[in-house]
Image (cartoon, helix red, strand yellow):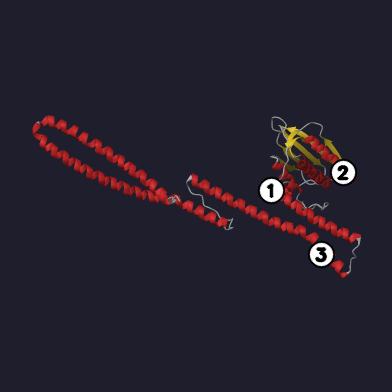
């Protein structure tokens, strides 16, 4: 197995190697140039004073080289020692924020998502610390949403379970008889639990981008038109007008069944929010190459703080009566399906009592031959 040096030692060795290379280069440069320059200078003096100085110059030359070598060795040793001290200090300074990041990651791995790393002065290390802090915040948000989901799921399950418990105790005590009506009520509560389990599974797959999408080239306007026709009888029974504007062709590459699920949810929510005598309009068109279906109603509307929150799991708009047996995750699933296609579902409203508008946007169909 290949053994690697630890990062502190590697940093120290790298700094020391630079210092040693610089010292060796300085030593060789001075050692090679100084004698020739000295000889050249002494030769000029020898010409001026005659041949009698030759022996003296030889001794001076030898003494000079000895002194030069000694001075160079001392200088190189001092420079390497100084470089080692500086390298150790720099290495320690660089490793301090890395040690802080390592400590923070260990705390995050242990579940302490509130850990925070102070930003060092070095830009690169500051970027690393920022990423770790961002990761901690994201994990904290995920943990908060997970805890909230468990609480909300438990709350949603409590009502049908309480009803089932009451019916069963009533049957045991003889308060209820096993009549078709009683059994039908039990069956309805069981179906509600089953529907909640299916919705929770769909929410999980949608948020984790694990939806099974069967993408084909399709006409978004035709999908919207079919969804409106399927729900038209419900609108008639509620005395709410359903207006469709889906005559143009809007080519997209999508899963028709999943998109129908999204539009059915948007139309169903619009119907529930709109009183008798109101109007729901569904429009399909092409916007900058992207397919868009807009569902607009004249119903209860949304306050500004509720526009994004309606996409949260189990969120109920305050003050609005519950008119549906749904689990409250339909819009969460709808947005997950849209984002799984590379699009989105957005909401807007001028205010409570002024209606709302939900838009499904899908990316354009890729160029090339039709695909299935």
Q: Nearer the viewer, residue 153 or 178?
A: 178
Q: 368 above or below 226?
A: above
Rate crowding at label 1 as few (under 14), some (14 to 19) or many (20 or more) other CA atoms within 10 Å.
Answer: some
Give residue 106's quadrant in the image: bottom right
Q: Which residue is mark 1?
A: 207
Q: Name the mark on residue 32.
A: none
Q: Are discs 1 and 2 less than 8 Å apart at CB?
A: no
Residue 153 position in % (x across, y down): 73, 57
Would residue 132 appear left or right of 370 to someone viewing this image? left
Residue 293 position in % (x across, y down): 77, 37
The residue drawn where x is 8% and y is 34% is: 52
Q: Which residue is mark 3?
A: 165
Q: Split into 4 quadrants, where in the image is the C terminus? A: top right
How far apart marks 1 and 2 lie (CA) works out to 31 Å
Q: Residue furthest left?
A: 52
The residue drawn where x is 62% and y is 54% is: 140
How far apart marks 3 and 1 lie (CA) works out to 33 Å
Who comes first in sequence, dot 1 or dot 2? 1
| Foreground: disc 3 or disc 2 | 3
Rate crowding at label 3 as few (under 14), some (14 to 19) or many (20 or more) other CA atoms within 10 Å.
Answer: few
Q: 231 above or below 149?
A: above
Q: Secondary structure at mark 3?
A: helix
| Foreground: disc 1 or disc 2 | 1
Q: Which residue is mark 2?
A: 235
Q: Secondary structure at mark 2?
A: helix
Q: 308 above or below 112?
A: above
Q: Nearer the viewer, residue 348 or 112?
A: 112
């Amino acid at each position: 197995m290949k053994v690697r040096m630890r990062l502190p030692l590697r940093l120290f060795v790298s700094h020391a190697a630079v210092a040693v290379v610089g010292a060796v280069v300085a030593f060789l440069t001075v050692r090679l140039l100084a004698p020739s320059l000295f000889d050249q200078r002494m030769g000029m003096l020898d010409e001026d004073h005659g041949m009698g100085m030759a022996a003296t110059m030889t001794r001076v030359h030898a003494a000079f080289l000895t002194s030069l070598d000694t001075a160079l060795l001392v200088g190189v040793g001092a420079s390497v020692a100084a470089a080692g001290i500086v390298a150790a200090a720099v290495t320690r300074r660089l490793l301090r924020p890395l040690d802080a990041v390592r400590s923070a990651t260990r705390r995050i791995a242990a579940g302490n998502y509130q850990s925070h790393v102070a930003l060092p002065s070095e830009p690169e290390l500051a970027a690393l610390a920022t990423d770790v802090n961002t990761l901690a915040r994201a994990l904290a948000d995920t943990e908060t949403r997970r805890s909230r989901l468990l609480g909300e799921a438990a709350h949603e399950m409590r009502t049908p379970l309480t009803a089932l418990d009451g019916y069963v105790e009533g049957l045991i005590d003889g308060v209820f008889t096993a009549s078709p009506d009683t059994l039908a009520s039990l069956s309805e509560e069981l179906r509600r639990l089953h529907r909640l389990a299916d919705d929770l599974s769909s929410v999980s797959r949608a948020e984790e981008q694990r939806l099974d999408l069967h993408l084909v080239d399709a006409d978004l306007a035709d999908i919207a038109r079919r969804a409106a026709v399927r729900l038209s009888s419900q609108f008639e029974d509620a005395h709410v007008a359903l207006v469709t504007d889906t005559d143009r062709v809007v080519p997209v590459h999508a899963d028709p069944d999943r998109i129908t699920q999204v539009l059915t949810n948007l139309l169903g929510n619009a119907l529930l929010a709109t009183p008798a005598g109101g109007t729901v309009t569904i429009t399909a068109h092409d916007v900058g190459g992207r397919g868009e279906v807009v569902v607009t109603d004249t119903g209860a509307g949304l306050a500004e703080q509720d526009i994004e929150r309606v996409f949260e799991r189990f969120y109920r708009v305050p003050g609005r009566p519950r008119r549906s047996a749904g689990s409250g995750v339909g819009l969460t699933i709808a947005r997950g399906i849209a984002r799984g296609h590379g699009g989105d579902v957005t909401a807007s409203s001028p205010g409570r009592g002024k209606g709302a508008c939900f838009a499904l946007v899908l990316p354009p169909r890729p160029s090339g031959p039709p695909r299935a």
